[in-house]
Image: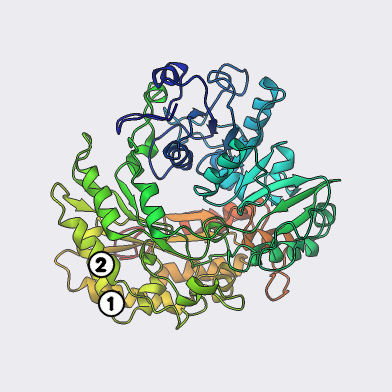
Amino acid sequence: MPPTETPASFVPTTPAEVRQLGWSALDVIIVSGDTYIDAPQIGAAVIARVLLAAGFRVGVIAQPDVSDGRDITRLGEPVLFWGVTGGSVDSMVANFTASGRRRKSDDLTPGGQNTRRPDRAVLAYSHLIRRHFKQTRPIVLGGIEASLRRISHYDAWSDGVRRSILFDAKAGFLLYGMADDTVVDLARRLQQGQSPHTLRGLCYIARELPDPDEARWNGPDVKLPDHAVVRDDKQAFARMFAQFYENTDPWRGRRLIQRQDTRFLVQNPPPPPPPPEVLDAVHELPYTRSVHPYYAADGPVAALETIRFSLTTHRGCFGECRFCAIAAHQGRQVISRSPASILREAEALTHHPDFKGIIADVGGPTANMYAMQCPVVAGRGGCTDKGCLVPRPCRTLAPDHRPQIALLDALRRLPGVRKVFVASGLRYDLILADRKHGEAYLETLLRHHVSGQLKIAPEHCDDRVLQRMGKPGRDRLEAFIDLFERVNHRLPKRCFLTYYFMAAYPGCGEPEMRALARFTREKLKLRPEQVQIFTPTPSTYATVMHYTETDPFSGDALFVEKKIKGKVAQKAMLTAAKWKGWDGKKKKQRPARGGKPGTGR
């Protein structure tokens, strides 16, 4: 019997809901480390909705108790497969701060207390399923935690190189990236009794080397160094990651093979990015934009207030910050939704009973990349010898903010909409590079789409550190501040800049942090409040630098602060009025005179 639903219905999470739909069983059961928020910003909800729209019977089990089988068994066993995700962030990042302390709060858990998400959630849930369903249907891993741990990877929490999560989870398959297209193809192949081994975006385990003629994508297979080699040899690890990263492009990516033990990890190339009309359809599925009542009974979910009335305009990012995994997960090509689709979604928000006229965010991984795409990338993939933005925006990119200006203008004019915010991150170097319309875009933001503070993330001021971060140089920040001031003088109400900085990045030691402290005091006139300590997460070049203590691009040796005390001291140089320096003595750091604390003006 095909699925039936109304716009107000949730994907079922209880046996009663399954019976109410007239289903005798579920084809797919999705297990997630987040609570079940039915919104297009939540990966488990998107996958569930996409499968449901394709005709499959789907259920969701959110944050099951791993101490017994009551939660994991309540919907029975799926006909096709289990889908397991750690949630919207890696569970170890969700559970621990950069200084190693366990987080007390969790915005994606009812009640806000961090008591429902196990460490290494993907492994915990996969093993939970195996305990209670011995010979079960395939377990399919997905989401950010699985996607970024799909090959041998450095794990900061165990301070070692772990093998592919697919092997540790004892799962059948892993879908990396966004996977909303791939998961439907996988379900159809399993339903028809066909092998999914030739699906793009799929990882699987092979007992023998796969036939090189089985499916040729963009050239012959690439054999990565064995796990046993990269586990013990840092330079081999760096070479492995470079090969991995070079093959994340759908146009050039080849099949990767890595021996993990006596078996092989096989990673098929990435799928092509979805066309805009497919992305439109995904975001216009009938999400309730609410927490399922079964979970809402345990308390409010803080993340709901952030995402409920937000609009995602695009997918992908060509910024390639070295500490960010978005390029590896979503891709370097930006795929933008049509303005008509975004406006339809916004108009639908105005009919939600809890909508108060405020759209909390309009953006994506980087807000001002909407409708921007290099024709070279769109035609044959990203360049191998240079980035799109660093050290300077590529002339082929031709940034143009007019489409987003027009979109924001149209959203403001919608009946029932009082305010439209842009809260997603911005690339200020992209604004500077758009010499025709960048200033008009900035003025539009300051006049209509921020609450008085514009947030930017320069992260540092030392050009060597910035180069290793993949961020624009200090001169670009100073040029943007000058532009901001020029625009600010034209506004009826003064706006301020809020800066985000990073401490303990690979290559950043005491001299670099002292330089940053001087820069923030003397140039920005502030003592920063928004400072994060670098966390080495899987599948980023920054983590390669952290682990190998080497710049993989130049081969230079790097100072890497690995001691918690040293990391905290780096942060304290920027944030604390008094702090204990590397010599253990208290250092005074006076707050900047004038201006608004923490804003830069």
Q: Are marks 2 and 1 in contact (CB under 8 Å)?
A: yes
Residue 487 position, x and y percent, is 23, 74
Out of 48 and 461, give the one closest to the viewer: 48
Which quadrant is home to the N terminus? top left
Badge 2 element: helix
Identify the residue position indicated by label 1 in the image: 437
* Amino acid beneath label 1: His
Residue 62 - label: none
Q: Is residue 77 left or right of residue 310?
A: right
**Residue under the image location 60 percent in, 61 percent down:** 505
Give the side of residue 371 with respect to residue 508, left or right: left
> Can the viewer see residue 527?
no
Residue at screen point 43% across, 16% down: 16
Q: Is 55 or 392 nearer to us in this picture?
A: 55
From the viewer's side, name the closer residue of 205 and 354.
Answer: 205
Return the residue at label 2: 405
Q: Nearer the viewer, residue 112 or 197?
A: 197
- The secondary structure type at the circle numbered 1 is loop
In the figure, 310 relative to 86: above or below? below
